[in-house]
Amino acid sequence: MADERNLLGEYLRARRERVGPEQVGLPRSGVRRVPGLRREEVALLAGISADYYLRLEQGRDRNPSVQVLESVARVLQLDDAGTAYLLGLAGDRPRRRRRPARRETVPAGTRKLLGAIGLPAFVEGRYLDVLAANSLATAVSPRLVVGRNRLRDVFLDPAEQALYAGYDPALIAAEMVAGFRQVVGAETDDPRLVELVGELSLASPAFREAWARHDVMVREGAAVTLDHPEVGPLALNREKLAVGGAPGLTLVVYHADVGTAAADKLQMLASYSAPARPPARPEGLVS
């Protein structure tokens, strides 16, 4: 049986290449054949031997201590999310049989909430598939319907990309992929993930570059301004909330600040998306 991928080594190399010597107080002297820090420089600054650090990158030591990893994380200037990801990659995970992917099911209560909340909202799964959405979310973006995938749409669909016309595409790509990587963690051999990453890597150079960076970011809420084709600029707050009792599922809700033009525009979109009511029956008639 083939060895497992050396995810720890891949991550260390990717992050080491993104830290220049001047960022850690070292002089940039001599010809450097690789970008970023040399292995021996990381080892020196982390207080470990160069041979031991080499074993970490080569995957020959799969159970380093937390203290060593935190020292390396400090040298590589990882934030809390990156450090937690590093610790997770190095955890003692015995080889196990690959289990079939579990069906992602939106709890009934969450589905009812989507219909009652009165705000654009949808539920996305671990792989950023849209699992449920209300009509107002679809009015914000027609791609927010069950069966679509947020990664595919943001990287491959021109209409979805146009919604984010006011943002740097490279920044959008980096943040979305970093959040996705944080969600999937070390389970990068999952068949669904392999298929999705492979497809996007072939179809989108922006995704391929962002995935190769190995950035990790906790998925949090943010303010976002969408360039909506019908109502124009739409300044919204986007919240991302874990769905209780459904690991890996996230409830995404958009809302506007009270009294703003965006709030009026959401009301306008809500009127467009409201289902037509049947005409009232005259009193006294029976069917």
Image (tube, rainbow, N blue to C red):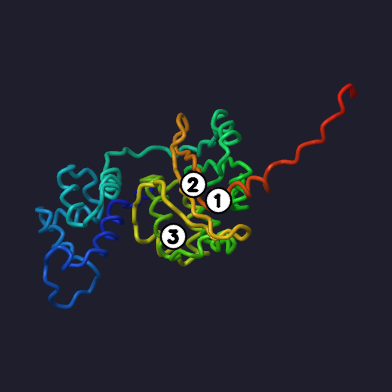
Label 2 neighbourhood size at 10 Å, few (<14), some (14-19), many (20+)?
A: some
Left or right position of 74 against 234: left
Please provide percent x and percent y for residue 220: 39, 46
**Which label sits on residue 149?**
1
Residue at image position (26%, 64%) is 18
Please provide percent x and percent y for residue 174: 40, 59
Amino acid on which the number 3 mark rests in the picture: Ile
Residue at image position (63%, 52%) is 142
Q: Are marks 2 and 1 in contact (CB under 8 Å)?
A: yes
Please provide percent x and percent y for residue 253: 50, 43
Looking at the image, how many numbered discs can be counted on the residues? 3
User: 9 above or below 102?
Assistant: below
Between circles 3 and 2, the one closer to the viewer is 3
Q: Spatial distance from mark 3 to mark 2, Cα to Cα?
A: 17 Å
The residue nearer to you, when weighing 191 against 139, is 139
The quadrant in which the C terminus is found is top right
User: 286 above or below 115?
Assistant: above
Residue at which label 2 appears: 127
Label 1 neighbourhood size at 10 Å, few (<14), some (14-19), many (20+)?
A: some
Q: Residue furthest front?
A: 259
Amino acid on which the number 2 mark rests in the picture: Tyr
Residue at which label 3 appears: 172
